[in-house]
Image (cartoon, coloured by chain):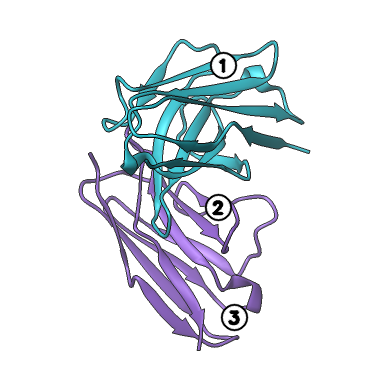
Chain colours: A purple, B cyan
């Protein structure tokens, strides 16, 4: 199975900050990397697919980059509604696996 | 509007069985693969099972293979997860999730989840 490791596990940031979350795969997954946002008590939402493609309706302050084994989610100009937990997920091969999550909290 | 509505969750004893269902609407159900993804209390996300649009391809994560069975009824726009030999570690919220495209592994719509608790 492909292991996905996110860092950090949590971070504190202020509104307006630029936030970067990294995700590392245990083997190359080419560009088959997706990001999800989950708010407390809610189902996850797809934010970004295949590394850098924004899902419809996702604000342009979200961006993704990377290839192979190392990937990044960047949120520029952090907004109050962005405080949530973010998960990366590989769709290269089954079992599709998720990172452990990164909780973005208000400083 | 795409809607996925899960039902059937509840409390079940270890070793017991439970059937959870997902009713889909707002899209051409027969054109999309479907998945179940679960989340244990306070934990992360775990993909559980996949079924292709015409049920030709079915996959499971190792921990549930042989105990869980996924199926679908395209005439009723529904997907089922039949769970047996349940264990405490199966306790989770189970989400019904649409695959963006056949076997892509990208999950673009999620239901609200149904809670399954395995406890004596």
Q: Is residue B27 visible?
A: yes
* Residue B13: % across, % down: 39, 34
**Which residue matches tag 1?**
B72
Which quarter of the image is occupied by the N terminus of chain B?
Answer: top right
Q: Residue at position x 65%, y 13% from top?
A: B74
Q: Is residue A32 visible?
A: no
Q: Residue at position x 32%, y 36% from top?
A: B87
* Residue A64: % across, % down: 47, 61
* Residue B52: % across, % down: 50, 19
Nearer to me, A59 or B17: B17
Nearer to me, A89 or A54: A89
Question: Could you say which disc has been placed on residue A77 in the image?
Answer: 3
* CA–CA distance in space, label 2 to label 1: 23 Å
* CA–CA distance in space, label 3 to label 1: 43 Å
Image mark 1: chain: B
Image mark 3: chain: A
């Amino acid at each position: 199975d492909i292991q996905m490791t996110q860092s950090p596990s949590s971070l504190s940031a202020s509104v307006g900050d630029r936030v970067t979350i990294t995700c590392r795969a245990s083997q190359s997954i080419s560009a088959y990397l997706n990001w999800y946002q989950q708010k407390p008590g809610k189902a996850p939402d797809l934010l970004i697919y295949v590394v850098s493609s924004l899902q419809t309706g996702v604000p342009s302050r979200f961006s993704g980059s990377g290839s192979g084994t190392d990937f990044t989610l960047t949120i520029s100009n952090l907004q109050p509604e962005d405080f949530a937990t973010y998960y990366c997920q590989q769709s290269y091969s089954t079992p599709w696996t998720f990172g452990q999550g990164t909780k973005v909290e208000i400083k | 509007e795409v809607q996925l509505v899960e039902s059937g969750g509840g409390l079940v004893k270890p070793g017991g069985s439970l059937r959870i269902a997902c009713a889909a609407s707002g899209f051409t159900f027969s054109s999309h693969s479907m998945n179940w993804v679960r989340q244990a209390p306070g934990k992360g996300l775990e993909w559980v099972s996949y079924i292709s649009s015409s049920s030709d391809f079915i996959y499971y994560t190792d921990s549930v293979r042989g105990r869980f069975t996924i199926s679908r009824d395209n005439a009723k726009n529904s997907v089922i997860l039949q769970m047996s030999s349940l264990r405490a570690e199966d306790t989770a919220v189970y989400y019904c999730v649409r695959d963006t495209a056949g076997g892509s592994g990208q999950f673009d719509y999620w239901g609200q989840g149904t809670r399954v608790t395995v406890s004596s």
